[in-house]
Structure formats: C-alpha cells, structure tokens
Image: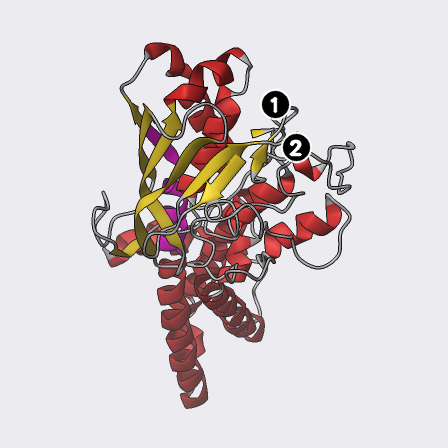
Amino acid sequence: MAESLRDSVCLPVCLSVAESLRDSGLRRNAVVGMGRVAERFAYRKTESRSDSATCDSSTKRGNVGWLISSVQLALASAIFYPDLVASPLALARRHLIMLKIARFAAAYLAAILLGHQVSQAALIINVNYTGDPQYAAAFSTAASTWQNLLGGFQNGLVVSTSAGSSYSNGQTVSTVFITANVEAIDGVGNVLGSAGPTAIALDAANYTLATNGLMRFDSADVAGLLSGGQWENVILHEMAHVLGFGTLWTNNGVYANNSGEFTGANATVQWQTEFGRSGTPDVELGGGVGTANGHWNEVDGGGLPTGIVDGLGRDLRDELMTGWLNPNTFISNMTVASFRDIGFTSISVVPEPSSLALACLGFGAIGYSRRRRAKN
C-alpha cells in the first residue's frame, strides 16, 4: 500500500518538482511552508461555518484541488529527500514536519469528506399528492423551481432528528418528503393554504433542516387559483415554508420572535443591495398568528405598495414570501439568500411572475405557515 501511495501520489509530484528544488534548504522550506499553509486552510475549512456559507461550489473545487497539490508536495518532499535527516537538527525538523503533515492530513481528510457530503446533498423535493390530477402538475413544477434555486445543503450530515423524520443519525439529508392535500379549510377567500415541517434534523454544521412536511390547500379556493394562473405561486409559497422559510428561522438563529428583523447575513446583503435598504430585512408582525413572524413585511392586508422596490421597479408587496399573495409575484434574491442562512447552498434566483394571505402557526419547535387572500 505504501508503494502504491508513493507511486500514485508522491512520485509524480516529486519528479515534477525535483529539478526546481535542487537546493536542500529550498526543499526543506517548501515542505514546512506548504505544510503550514495547507494545515491552516484545512482547519479553517472544517471549522468555519461562515466561510463555507460564502464559498460557491467552483471555489470549493478549486480549494480542494489546491489542497491536494499541497499534500502531494509535502509528502513527496518528506519521503523522497532523505538528506533531510543528515543531521540531528535535520532529524528533529523532519519529525516536526511529519507531525505537521499528520495534523493537516487529518484535517484535510475531514475537509474532503465534508466536501464530498456537501456535493452529494443535492436537494430533492418529493411531493406525495393523490388528489385531483388537474392540480398535480404544479407541484412538480414548484418542486423543480426550488430545487434549481436552492441547489442543495451546505452540510446535511444528520447528527440528531425529531420524531417522524425519514432520516437517521449518520445519513445525509437530500430528499425532503412532503405530503400535499386539497381539503376544506375556511371556505372561499381568506386562507388559501398552510404548510410547515412535520419533522426536522440537526446536521453536523448545526443547521436545523426540514426532512418531512405537510402542505394543505383550501378546496374552496383551488379551482379559482388554477384558472387565475396563481395556483403554482401558492404552492411555491407553501413549499418554501416546509423547507424552513419563516418556520425554522428561530431554530437556525436568524430570527427572534416579535423582533421584526431577520438577521441572516446573506439575506441582509440582498436587502441592502437588491432593495437599497439599510439594516436588516423587515419581518411581518401583522396579520395575526400564522402570518406574523414568518414573512417579509408589507402593508397589512397586502393591498397597498410598500414603496420598497428592487432595481426592476418591483415592489416588495409582490414578492413571493410576503404574507399576502398579489399579482405579478416574483422571487427575490433576498428570499433565495435567506435559504443560505438556514443551511442551503442557494444557487441563483429566477423571478416568477403572479392579493391573497399567508400565515405561521407554531407547534413545538416546528413552525407552520398559511397564506391568505390580499385585501384590496
């Protein structure tokens, strides 16, 4: 095995750098220098949640490639230059070097394993809907939208779960299982749907993730939503609540109930750049239980513009994740970025064109949200 390691990892690098590293001092400095840099990078990668939250997948691949090269160079230099042990001082240095190699190699392996898990934790939304077939297609379309926007999970390695979760410790969250029902809620108008996680998991990066959820839609409103072209928007909204928008904010430390301020760093950047605001994103405190503390803020009832617009002139009132549904619905960069603050990778945003209400009911540590019709 040692010969295989030498031939496949160390020897190619050794041969490529041997001629350029003729001086023994330079060789020794290369080992120590690369070891220190790689060690520092590996530990930063494994223990810094904020770094991983702001590093895109291409950067991660580049960093991993660079780290592999560093390990190869360090191992090659240590193994294939026996003159490093020509003196007691050199021997001591060699022991120090090998200790450093062992330390950062362990961190390196942890980083690679974590990176592997991240790359495997792509989001899949599995919706179980068995109702009227005419309503079914929108569930698949909405699931695809969130899968494309959110990409996957930053970590996803399960360390604990709530009762009813489809996952066990040591597994990696990828698929979120959602049951969707069309049923009687409160008649025509008012509440259009409600949704939230029914089971959660804590991952190794300390994010609380939804693993299972439930969406309910009022049978009295569905036909009108479908004919009016807003059925998919309502599903998108409720599906976001299952995934954690407004329902797992407190669990993930980005919102304190009744504070009215979302404190996630990524959404805050978009609040300031996309909408040109200062401070942190405003959270709805009106609308009662089910709407308050789980949506972006707008004028109560959703019938009037907020005056907060993005670069395309779109008012925040029409954003998908406000408490009341309005025509011309769009998904903001701020909403997508907020998912990064609660454990997703968040790839990009694709605006969705589409006054109806949304609400948040708490049960236990898991939130529950519902949407209402806007009052014009």
Q: What residue is shown with label 2?
A: 318
Measured as percent of width and height from the top left, residue 354 is found at 61, 23
Vertical placement of residue 52 versus 345, above or below: below
Secondary structure beneath dot 1 equals loop
Stretch in magenta: 112-127
| Residue 33 seen in render | yes
Whether residue 330 is situated above or below residue 249 in the rendered picture:
above
Q: Nearer the viewer, residue 60 or 324?
A: 324
Q: Is residue 123 magenta?
A: yes
Q: Residue 11 vs residue 231: left or right?
A: left
Relative image position of residue 86 (x, y in whole percent) = 42, 82
Q: Residue at x 39, y 15 (%)?
A: 135
Residue 354: assigned label: 1
| Displayed quadrant of residue 152 | top left
Given the image, on which type of amino acid does mark 1 rest?
Ser
Task: Report the front residue among 54 and 3.
Answer: 54
Image quadrant containing the N terminus: bottom left
Picture coordinates of residue 80, whole percent (x, y): 40, 64
The answer to whether mark 1 and mark 2 are in CB contact below 8 A is: yes
Residue drawn at x 46%, y 23% as measured from the top left: 188
> How far separated are the C-alphas under marks 1 and 2?
8 Å
